[in-house]
Image (cartoon, coloured by chain):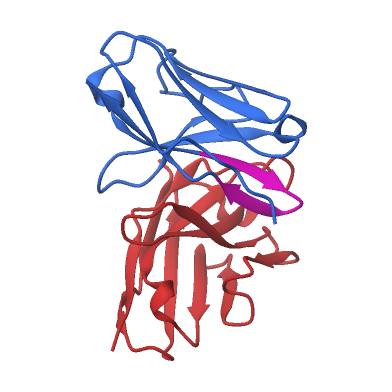
Chain colours: A blue, B red
Amino acid sequence: SYELTQPPSVSVSPGQTASITCSGDKLGDKYACWYQQKPGQSPVLVIYQDSKRPSGIPERFSGSNSGNTATLTISGTQAMDEADYYCQAWDSSFYVFGTGTKVTVL
Amino acid sequence: EVQLVESGGGLVKPGGSLRLSCAASGFTFSSYSMNWVRQAPGKGLEWVSSISSSSSYIYYADSVKGRFTISRDNAKNSLYLQMNSLRAEDTAVYYCARDPTFGTTGYFDYWGQGTLVTVSS
């Protein structure tokens, strides 16, 4: 079965850039998306189809996908961005989530 | 406004059954494929099952295949998950989620608030 691997944690200072990676075999041949989940809340889509932002998602969130790695970048990170982030890909009618990354804004 | 409201969670003994429901509003329910996604306490997200808009295509994760059944009633704008032979490892918050891509790229643009299922004796 297809697997997506993320680093367990990423730390970033306020105003700096956070990059979260998501690795999977030939992931660049698929579309990747990203969800943000804050404690006690449902996931929220922040990036879809590799790099598109849904309405209402700040411009500081961006995404890319190439080779075996998709990346979510948060530019000018704010305290409110502290959350768990999950990548997800779709593989032949099956949805696969990454292992999740906890972003801490120090 | 798109709304997805799950219900039906609760405490059930191992081997027992439970039926989850998801009431949808604010969009044309019959035009979208729908999904169940779960999250065990303190763990990551796990896709459980999907159903196409007309129920023609249904898929399950290996972990629930043969025990769970997804269904929908487009006249009632509702999605269901019948869970049988429940195990302790099925304990999780179950989310209802909409996929707007009509079976192409696959992602979830709206999620419900979730309903907790606890399997314990």
Could you tell whether B57 is left or right of B110 in the image? right
Residue A14 located within the stretch drawn in magenta: no
The relative height of residue B108 versus residue A83 in the rendered view (above or below) is: below
The residue under the point 75% across, 35% down is A26
- Per the picture, the main secondary structure of the magenta-coloured stretch is strand
Looking at this view, is A2 or B82 the one in front?
A2
Quadrant placement of the N terminus of chain B: top left
Looking at this view, is B69 or A77 the one in front?
A77
Q: Residue A68 location, x and y as percent?
A: 70, 31
Quadrant placement of the C terminus of chain B: bottom left
Residue A92 located within the stretch drawn in magenta: yes
The residue under the point 59% across, 77% down is B69
The residue under the point 50% across, 52% down is B97
The relative height of residue B118 versus residue B46 in the rendered view (above or below) is: below
Q: Residue B60 location, x and y as percent?
A: 64, 67
The relative height of residue B98 versus residue B49 in the rendered view (above or below) is: above
Q: Residue A10 location, x and y as percent?
A: 37, 27
Q: Which residue range is magenta in the image?
A: A87-97
The relative height of residue A105 versus residue A101 in the rendered view (above or below) is: above
The residue under the point 57% across, 82% down is B67
**Residue B17 seen:** yes
